[in-house]
Image: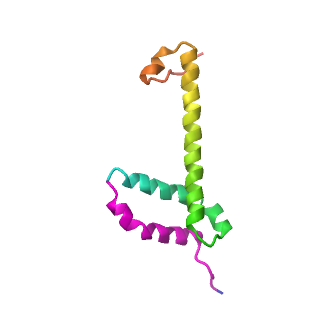
Amino acid sequence: MGRTNPTYRDALRAIEERWAEFRRALRRRDQPRFDRLFEYAREHADASGLLNHQNPLLPALLSIDLEQEARIDEHEARLEDIEAALENGHGDTISGNVPKEKDD
């Protein structure tokens, strides 16, 4: 017997195709950002497919949120490292230079 539902990856591909005209209308600098959002959704396609949600856009949006949350966490950790380096007297981080690891 055949499947009654398309796979989640098929549904996600169809969503991306429906948004293709919107993507083309975006400024060139925003098109890679748009593409990245769908990359985020594809990274969680296995989990989204298990959900088998009636509206495949909702798991895609949550997947995008998860990836953006991970990026925020990475930036916060990096900021904490920079702040700690400043507190330890590494003033060169103010100009954007992250201190190099010391060879012990």
Give the residue at the far right of this rendering.
Answer: 50
Residue 13 in the image, given as x and y percentages of width and height: 49, 69
Give the residue at the far top of this rendering.
Answer: 89
Residue at left 32%, top 54%?
Answer: 27
Task: Kindly report the secondary structure that dominates the magenta region of the rendered protein.
Answer: helix
Residue at left 62%, top 73%?
Answer: 54
Question: Is 95 inside the magenta-drawn segment?
Answer: no
| Viewer-side residue, 50 vs 29 | 29
Q: Quadrant of the C terminus?
A: top right
Residue 8 in the image, given as x and y percentages of width and height: 58, 69
Q: Quadrant of the N terminus?
A: bottom right
Residue at left 54%, top 24%?
Answer: 82
Residue 10 in the image, given as x and y percentages of width and height: 53, 72
Location of residue 63 with respect to 11 vertically, above or below: above
Location of residue 52 with respect to 42 vertically, above or below: below
Which portion, as a residue range, is magenta? Answer: 2-27
Residue 69 in the image, given as x and y percentages of width and height: 58, 46
Is residue 40 something that shows in the picture?
yes
Question: Is 4 inside the magenta-drawn segment?
Answer: yes
Is residue 102 something that shows in the picture?
no
- Quarter location, residue 87: top right
Residue at left 34%, top 50%?
Answer: 29
